């Protein structure tokens, strides 16, 4: 248990489906992040929220839609995905933006688009 | 864009020492992080360097040279449980972390 919980751990979805990934942290952190991790590639930053306000939208296709209803929860809504979107999606949190202890990551959701 | 390079794979023997190098070319620099990620698990924070020099934490040490755009993670007295991927990440602004692709370390008996 890392303090950041992601559900589901595994997800298989068709290209026409709509699904959501959930991230929850009860560490009292104020910043939350979505990263995409593809095999043999660097983690790609997707979205950043600070105090429930989006501060970064890193040129992510609109088929990915984030939501941060409160400082403990972060969602990633998915619709009409492509096979190349198959990856590990990692959520992370930090006390504040730019703090020196790095992020606390969740274990990720392994997404397969068929 | 940001460019962070680290070797793809390394293999070492239990009890030995392994050094994982990371070189970076980024638009700014505000600290370098190392993370460990076991297969199927979350990356976990190992170390943070913002000033030049060596930071030691038990069996793990991390070194930074800002003038050379270079860091290394040193793993001593390797154990089987150290088999994992090691991620180098640079904070190039106020908060954004740019990651390398990771180095997979395999420890053999």
Image (spheres, helix red, strand yellow):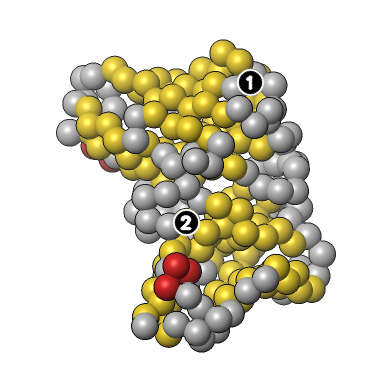
Q: Position of residue B103 (x, y in %)?
A: 46, 67
Q: Which subunit holds the residue at mark 1? A: A
Residue B86, given in percent of the width and then of the height, sits at: 51, 63
How many residues crowd around disc 1 within 10 Å: few (fewer than 14), some, or many (20 or more)? many
Q: Is residue A50 visible?
A: yes
Image quarter of residue B95: top right
Q: Is residue A30 left or right of residue B21?
A: right
Q: Residue at x 51, y 17 (%)?
A: A67
Residue found 58% across the figure and 79% down from its top: B76
Which quadrant holds residue A29? top right
Residue highlighted by disc 2? B37
Identify which residue, A94 or A54, lies in the foreground. A94
Looking at the rendered image, the quarter that the C terminus of chain B falls into is bottom left
State the image coordinates of residue A61 (x, y, percent, origin top left).
41, 28
Q: Which mark is residue A71?
A: 1
Along the horizontal axis of the image, is B77 left or right of B13?
A: right
Q: Residue at 73% of width from left, 34% of height from top?
A: A96
Residue B37 left/right relative to B93: left
- The residue marked by circle 2 belongs to what chain? B
In screen coordinates, is B51 left or right of B35?
A: right
- The answer to whether residue A48 is visible is no
Secondary structure category for the residue under label 2:
strand
Q: Residue at x 45, y 82 (%)?
A: B14
* Mark 1 element type: loop
For residue A49, which quarter of the picture? top right
Q: CA distance from mark 1 to mark 2?
A: 25 Å
Question: Callout 2 environment at 10 Å: few (<14), some (14 to 19), or many (20+)?
Answer: many
User: Looking at the image, is B87 positioned above or below residue A43?
Assistant: below
């Amino acid at each position: 248990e890392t303090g950041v919980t992601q559900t589901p751990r595994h997800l298989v979805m068709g290209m026409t489906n709509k699904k959501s990934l959930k991230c929850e942290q009860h560490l009292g952190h104020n910043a939350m992040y979505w990263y995409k991790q593809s095999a043999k590639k660097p983690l790609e930053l997707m979205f950043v929220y600070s105090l429930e306000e989006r501060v970064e939208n890193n040129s992510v296709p609109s088929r990915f839609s984030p939501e941060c209803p409160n400082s403990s929860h972060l969602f990633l809504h998915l619709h009409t995905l492509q096979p190349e979107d198959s990856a590990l999606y990692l959520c992370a949190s930090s006390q504040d933006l730019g703090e020196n202890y790095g992020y606390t990551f969740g274990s990720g959701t392994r997404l397969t688009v068929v | 864009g940001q460019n962070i390079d680290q070797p793809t794979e390394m293999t070492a023997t239990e009890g030995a020492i392994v050094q994982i190098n990371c070189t970076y070319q980024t638009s700014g620099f505000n600290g370098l992080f190392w993370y460990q990620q076991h297969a199927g698990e979350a990356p976990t924070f190992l170390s943070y360097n913002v000033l030049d020099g060596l930071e030691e934490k038990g069996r793990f040490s991390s070194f930074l040279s800002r003038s050379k755009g270079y860091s290394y993670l040193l793993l001593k007295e390797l154990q089987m449980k150290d088999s994992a991927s090691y991620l180098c990440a640079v904070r190039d602004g106020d908060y954004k972390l740019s990651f390398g692709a990771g180095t997979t370390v395999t420890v053999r008996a």
